[in-house]
Amino acid sequence: MWPQPFQHTHNAIAHHNHHHNVPSVGFTLLTTIKQRQRWGEADGHAMVQWGELFFDLFYVAGAYNLASILKEGISGLAVLYFVGCFGGIMLIWNHRLLFDAGFAVTNDDALGVTVVSWSHLIILATAVLHIRPVGLMAYPTESVEMFCYALALLLESILVAVVYIIVYLYVEGGPEARVTARRELIKNSVVMAFYGAATVVAGVEFYVNGAGSVQANLDEAVDVYQHEATAAAAPDSSGRPNYVPIVLVICGWISYGAALFWEAFIRFPRLDDVRKVTIPYDGEYIIHRHGEWIMLMLGESVLSLLIVQISYGKEYYVTFYCGILSVMGFQSLHYHSQPHHAEEHAMRRSTKAGTLFFLLMGIYSMALVAIGASYKLLLTEHIYDDGYSEDFMYGLSRQRRSLGGDDMSPEERRKRIAVLFTASLTVAFVVLDLMILCHKGIKENWYRIMSGKGVTVTLVRMGLDAFTATLSLYVTEPQTVSVAGLVVIMLQVAVRVAGSIIFPMEKIERKDGGSSTSDGQGRGSEHSAFSNIMYSIFYSPLPFILPVEHQDDAGSLSDVEENVKSKGDNV
């Protein structure tokens, strides 16, 4: 029922539409939902439409609001609410991703599709709007934010249930389509139960025990809301925090991931079993959408570096440009580490690998947003040193050791910023390596490691991860932390380059007499891999966007440069 992500496919849907004259436009009440492809059919080579890009715009604000939770105060509670709110809105994105990759509607202009699509966006906007600092969300008796956020998630889960009920009743496809709809309904019902409980708890706190109760004065409730900055930094000691709603929200979206894990590893471990209970998803479309999702997460780092008060000291600009270069290097690192075609993706290798990749993507995305928040905090430390008034401090000058605690000392604050930065960077590095393992498998990478030079590359990579994890023990000054972060990211990029050169797309002799033809990262020969990297860094605004196998026809790096020059007028 969500808008069709693309219009042209080479599967059974296009064949059906051609022979049965199914209309592609027109204002009608209902539409037909079809299984996008059957097992054994090629992917439809999806093209993302404007509706998906417009949908993604809401997550630009979502990432910014999520980062504000960490910017307003670095503490264990801040991490708890950051993780809880992040998982809730990412599950909304994943629901739409899986539906669009597995099903299609024949008429996007049908009234029913429009109502569902617009409701979907309104609910998402409500959830994003009410992602606020801990000082508001942790006090549901004084602020309505937690209730509204939980209610939005509940309404979204109800909407998802309605969509899959319609799919179950009216979908055109194989028997696995209805089984998929039934499984999604079961998983979503558990999520809905947790979200409903969170909504009830937060609602009772606000409307019965708190500022929204009949006994409360309306003006006092408005006053609480208008002074949210003060409440976020230093909640009223007379308030009573309640962490149950956010814990229930976390249990809700974790239950969905746990269900995916249980299905892949325990319930349906064999591919033959999977084909009976689930539909195939368009791998090319999922890869494309995940690439756009990572751009949204990296966008938080860009926003944090550019939307900030300016300090005119040398240290500020060193931190700023180190941050910009770090984000550029990290996006190069990410896209060089991921496959560009479905055949190389973890989803094609096995159900277990695809499920693990899907779950790791959530952790990885959280780390990227936390890195962006860290850059904002590092830059703001320089502004703090310049003696700006608190109006320019984005709440940072009023951070607390804990809710209702004493003011942080500058040393304590910088220590926490360094810990946040290094911890999130380490998680991103480690999870990125785990995602590569999902794509190629432990056995495949083990042969690469044992082939000789692979041991050195692996040890260097592990050493960089260990150094990053302990970096906050050595340095806490913002300028030094940002420089160290840039060095580590560029070294990681260099290790990836070395891996592409050492392990070209050629056979690697195995201990068991077999051979491998993969370089572990879906890349081509030594020369083409190096050319791909150089071209991406110096010429492409989206590094590593072109698959290496398509660059073999372009020849050497000089040929690539010539192509760029010849096409320059058309860019």
Image (cartoon, rainbow, N blue to C red):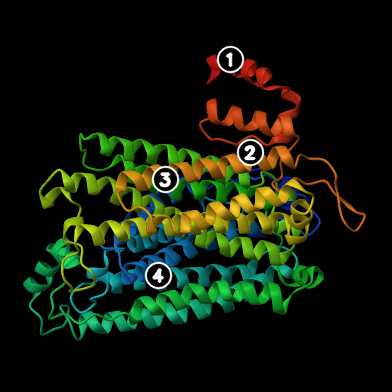
Marker disc for residue 109: none
Q: Which mark is residue 565?
A: 1
Res 484 label: 3
What amino acid type is highlighted by mark number 4? Gly
The earlier-in-sequence mark between 4 and 2 is: 4
Per the image, the residue denoted by label 4 is 84
Q: Nearer the viewer, mark 3 or mark 2?
A: 3
Please provide percent x and percent y for residue 567: 59, 17
Q: Which residue is labeled 2 in the image?
A: 497
Crowd tier of the residue under label 2, counting other residues whose Cα lies within 10 Å: few below 14, some 14–19, many 20 or above:
some
Residue 527 horizontal side relative to residue 57, left or right: right
Do the numbered discs 1 and 3 sit on residues whose CB atoms are within 8 Å?
no
Q: Does 359 appear above or below 463?
A: below
Position of residue 73 in the picture relative to residue 30 (left or right): left
Compared across the picture, whether 131 is left or right of 335 comes to left
Contact between marks 1 and 2 (CB within 8 A): the answer is no
Q: Determine the CA span between mark 3 and mark 4.
A: 30 Å
Q: Amino acid at mark 1?
A: Lys
Dot 2 amino acid type:
Val
Answer with the quarter of the image where residue 512 lies.
bottom right
Q: Nearer the viewer, mark 1 or mark 3?
A: 3
